[in-house]
């Protein structure tokens, strides 16, 4: 079992290149099978979730050729199986995007129903409501969603909750559904826009992505394209909070500063200097961090995927902060781990009340999920002494070369897989 071992207390300083957005890539890879022509996708992050998605796509018979670490060629003309294996959905919920993609292209798709996950129960009723509105019959049979349509047709769909996944899934199917579709109360996240841009580059007719009303005119077929995925705002934000928590000075490069605004506004509020460039953001932490309150919301609000990272930083800020999670029910699992590192954090309902402490101390902790795992790395980097993080496979789902990028900023962190390697690391860094 791999672990991270960290010697904390070193301010992170320097520049770091941000990779492609995992969550945009997961949807774009699925949408790539919607044409029989070859699609080339670039700026793909080389992370576990993406590799599983590529396997899922190959698993239904599409041609997948990894040109290099960040580029892939996909050809969906050889698809022979419209039923996605449970093995993939177990590993990544987002393989449900194949439902929207296959239903649009073949009018038939079968994908196992994803269960809950570490951050809570995650219904997909809005996705299914959308497919039904587009003319599909949708049934749950032996644990799988079976969607079929004689004929798809555009429709007016009002989402009951703002859902990134439902917006994207419906947008994919509707791209090939004759007539006009209007999605109201649509999610506005940057990756919704990226998927719409990608589909449009394949010949789809989608307008309004990035607002809460998306209008789609169904087209007959989609065609080849070459497309580069947007930078990952969550990876970028994670490094910026790591800079703040370690009292460092970090520039994230290859980012879209606009996508980071909710995060950078909070960094300024807690006393950091933020400088924005065309495609970079620099954060310099002051000696003191100030308390703040934050509530997660759909974009352009503060992202739930950045909630654990700000919470860790606030454990080291002067005063009492309140972090409220309004998107997922179970996203404070890291709080007990942080308490073991000396943080004062108490969870009440969907809020965490944090009383800032002067320092954290290293401990052995366990990553409960992807973003909380990354947040525990930030805690380890800012803590006194050694921190060992178990279950880092969660972190590897979404961060490419995480430890290497952190080392390039001066961090002492290593991926290890035995007690002996931990001892060796401790001897080396002293
Ligand atoms: C996506 C992201 C995830 C991020 C989340 C919120 C991907 C692969 N994952 O997840 O990292 O944390 O957006 O920004 O892009 N809901 C329903 N019914 C539905 C769908 C959603 O009730 O049919 C609820 C969810 O339980 C949640 C809220 O809506 O409370 C938002 O979920 P959603 O935006 O769909 O998240 P995901 O697309 O699953």
Image: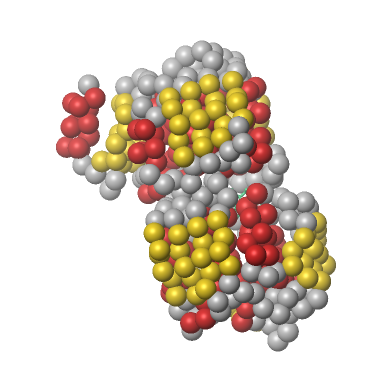
**Relative vertical location of residue 292 with respect to residue 115 in this rendering, above or below:** above
Q: How is the image coloured?
A: secondary structure
- Left or right relative to 104: residue 309: left
Q: Quadrant of residue 72?
A: bottom left
**Residue drawn at (71%, 41%) of the image:** 300
Residue closest to the eye, 29 or 129 = 29
Q: Please state the horizontal and vertical placement of residue 195, each as a whole percent of the image.
A: 63, 59
**Relative vertical location of residue 420 with respect to residue 155 in this rendering, above or below:** above
Name of the residue lying farthest toward the bottom: 150
**Residue drawn at (18%, 32%) of the image:** 424
Residue closest to the eye, 245 or 410 = 410
Image quadrant where one finds the C terminus: top left
Whether residue 256 is visible here, answered yes or no, is yes
Q: Quadrant of residue 428?
A: top left
**Residue drawn at (66%, 59%) of the image:** 197
Query: How many numbered circles does the render carry?
Result: 0
Q: Please state the horizontal and vertical placement of residue 33, each as a whole percent of the image.
A: 55, 73
Residue closest to the eye, 351 or 412 = 412
Q: Please state the horizontal and vertical placement of residue 157, each as a whole percent of the image.
A: 79, 65
**Relative vertical location of residue 323 with respect to residue 299 in this rendering, above or below:** above
**Relative vertical location of residue 236 with respect to residue 345 in this rendering, above or below:** below
**Residue drawn at (64%, 69%) of the image:** 202
- Left or right relative to 159: residue 327: left
- Left or right relative to 384: residue 99: right
Q: Please state the horizontal and vertical placement of residue 365, each as a whole percent of the image.
A: 37, 35
Whether residue 260 is visible here, answered yes or no, is no
């Amino acid at each position: 079992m791999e672990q991270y071992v960290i010697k904390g207390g070193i301010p992170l300083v320097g520049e770091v290149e941000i990779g492609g957005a995992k969550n945009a890539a997961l949807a774009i890879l699925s949408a790539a099978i919607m044409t029989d022509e070859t699609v080339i996708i670039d700026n793909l992050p080389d992370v576990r979730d993406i590799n599983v998605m590529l396997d899922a796509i190959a698993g239904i018979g599409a041609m997948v050729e990894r040109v290099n670490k960040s580029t892939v060629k996909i050809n969906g003309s050889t698809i022979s199986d419209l039923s996605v294996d449970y093995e993939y959905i177990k590993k990544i919920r987002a393989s449900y995007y194949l439902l929207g993609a296959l239903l649009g292209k073949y009018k038939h798709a079968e994908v196992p129903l994803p269960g809950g996950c570490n951050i809570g129960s995650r219904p997909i009723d809005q996705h299914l409501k959308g497919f039904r509105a587009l003319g599909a019959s949708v049934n749950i049979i032996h644990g799988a969603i079976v969607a079929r349509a004689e004929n798809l047709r555009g429709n007016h769909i009002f989402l009951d909750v703002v859902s990134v996944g439902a917006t994207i899934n419906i947008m994919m199917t509707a791209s090939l559904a004759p007539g006009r579709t209007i999605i109201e109360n649509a999610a506005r996240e940057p990756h919704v826009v990226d998927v719409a841009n990608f589909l449009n580059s394949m010949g789809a007719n989608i307008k309004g992505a990035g607002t809460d009303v998306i209008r789609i005119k169904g087209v007959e077929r989609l065609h080849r394209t070459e497309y580069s995925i947007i930078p990952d705002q969550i990876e970028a934000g994670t490094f910026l909070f790591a800079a703040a928590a370690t009292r460092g000075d970090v520039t994230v490069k290859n980012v879209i500063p606009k996508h980071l605004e909710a995060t950078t506004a909070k960094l300024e509020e807690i006393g950091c200097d933020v400088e924005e460039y065309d495609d970079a953001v620099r954060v310099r932490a002051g000696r003191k961090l100030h308390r703040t309150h934050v509530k997660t919301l759909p974009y352009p609000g503060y992202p739930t995927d950045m909630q654990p990272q700000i919470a860790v930083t606030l454990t080291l800020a002067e005063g009492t902060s309140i972090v409220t999670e309004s998107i997922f029910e179970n996203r404070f699992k890291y709080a007990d781990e942080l308490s073991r590192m000396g943080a004062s954090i108490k969870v009440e309902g969907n809020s965490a009340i944090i009383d800032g402490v002067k320092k954290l101390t290293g401990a052995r902790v366990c990553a409960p999920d992807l973003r909380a795992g990354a947040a525990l790395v930030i805690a380890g980097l800012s803590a006194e002494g050694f921190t060992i993080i178990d279950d880092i496979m969660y972190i590897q789902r979404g961060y490419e070369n995480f430890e290497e990028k952190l080392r390039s900023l001066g961090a002492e962190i290593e991926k290890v897989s035995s007690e002996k390697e931990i001892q060796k690391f401790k001897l080396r860094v002293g």
